Image (cartoon, helix red, strand yellow):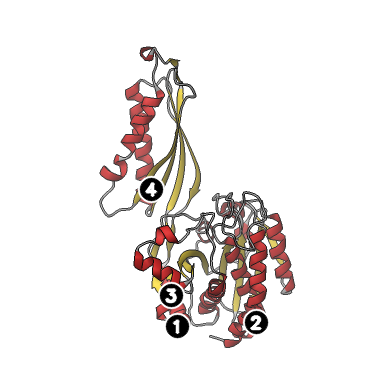
Amino acid sequence: MATEIFESLDRQLQAQRELYMELHRTPELSMEEHRTAERIEGEIARLGLTCQRIGGTGVVAVIENGDGPTVLARADIDALPVSENTGLDYSSEVDGVMHACAHDMHTVALLGAAAALAENRAAWSGTYIALFQPGEETAAGAQAMVDDGLTEKLPAPDVALSQHVMPTEAGTIGTVVGPVLSAGDSVRITVHGRGAHGSMPHNAVDPVVLAASIVLRLQTIVSRETQPGEFAVVTVGASNAGFKSNIIPDRAELLLNVRTYDDAVRERVLASIERIVRGECEAAGSPHEPEFEYYDQFPLTRNDAEVTDTVTAAFTEHFGAERVYEATPVTASEDFSRIPDAFGVPYTYWTVGSVPAEKYRTALERGTVAQDIPANHSPFFAPAIDPTLETATRAHVVAAVAYLGGRARP
């Protein structure tokens, strides 16, 4: 690969560090990333490039550089409603809001890659699309960009790329073929009873007992309806009913979260949930049909084999085999795949480690990773800037040049 691109990366690294700390201090919640979007636009303008807004606070820059494939690279830009407790001197200055999932790192890494490619056009040929997506945490941003005409406003890519900083060993990169992130569905279920005085349960249809029966029965979806070896999670995160000890309420609400790695399994699990809830309601003599509201729905992220193999080979050549490993699929969820799916193109999504090597290896040897290493969404989550930022930036460039450098054809 062209050494001049990576020489550019070395020269801009200090500026990237400063921008990262700036963004970390000023996080914004999903679909409210107005200052962040303006800051991204300013950086793109500094490169002599133009950009456009898509999906409200989404920003996209297109670098056209002759014949060749078109590569789309995506970074998410939103923060979380978390109060930071890292003690960093560049901690969030916004009460109750924090970049607790490294989207600030993702943003700066993609900006760095776009800058290096824009400044070294002789080293590659084709089109590079740098897409900065809002609202990943609420599964709203990718769809908002699609709904705002993403596929009509941009050249069609041949391949799409994305990455995520994770609490694994800094300087390493994880890739995997097939499912890498689960599909996610949240479900709000309302079941109805008949209220009565707490001393007169015979006059009631008790929704508290009904909800309890449903919670217990839902556990059989994974233990008795899902084939061993298949992955599924059904979690009841909340069960709410009533407000006083001597009043039987007339309804109860359950909040469920479902994760799956296979679309067929997902459909079966969701159908089982509705079947069980309706059956328990009928058995209890519920006076009204239950209500189901589906929200915060994330698609399955399934890496294309050919694209993943191409990018993994490029990573291995550039970083060395000791820094590239086969990742384990993560049970968290993402909305990135809605973008390549809208274009109908293959994609791959990899992870970048962020924990100092010695700290991570010590925790791994002790078996205390879960206790000693703050995970994404934790108020203590603090990626090591070095070498994480450099690795993430180089990873974007290496993956793009695998196609734009003429070595691979989509």
| Circle 4 residue | 266
Q: Residue at x 43, y 79 (%)?
A: 316
3D distance between C-alphas at marks 2 and 3: 26 Å
Q: Dot 1, crowdedness within 10 Å: few (<14), some or many (≥20)?
A: few
| Circle 2 residue | 11
Q: Dot 3, crowdedness within 10 Å: few (<14), some or many (≥20)?
A: many
**Secondary structure at numbered mark 2:** helix
Work out whether mark 2 precedes mark 1 in sequence or the reverse, and give the earlier one: 2
Q: Is residue 191 above or below residue 272?
A: above
Work out whether mark 4 precedes mark 2 in sequence or the reverse, and give the earlier one: 2
Work out whether mark 3 precedes mark 1 in sequence or the reverse, and give the earlier one: 3
Task: State the residue in front, 326 or 21.
Answer: 21
Q: Nearer the viewer, mark 4 or mark 2?
A: 2
3D distance between C-alphas at marks 3 and 1: 9 Å
Q: Dot 4, crowdedness within 10 Å: few (<14), some or many (≥20)?
A: many
Q: Quadrant of residue 85?
A: bottom right
Q: Quadrant of residue 225?
A: top left
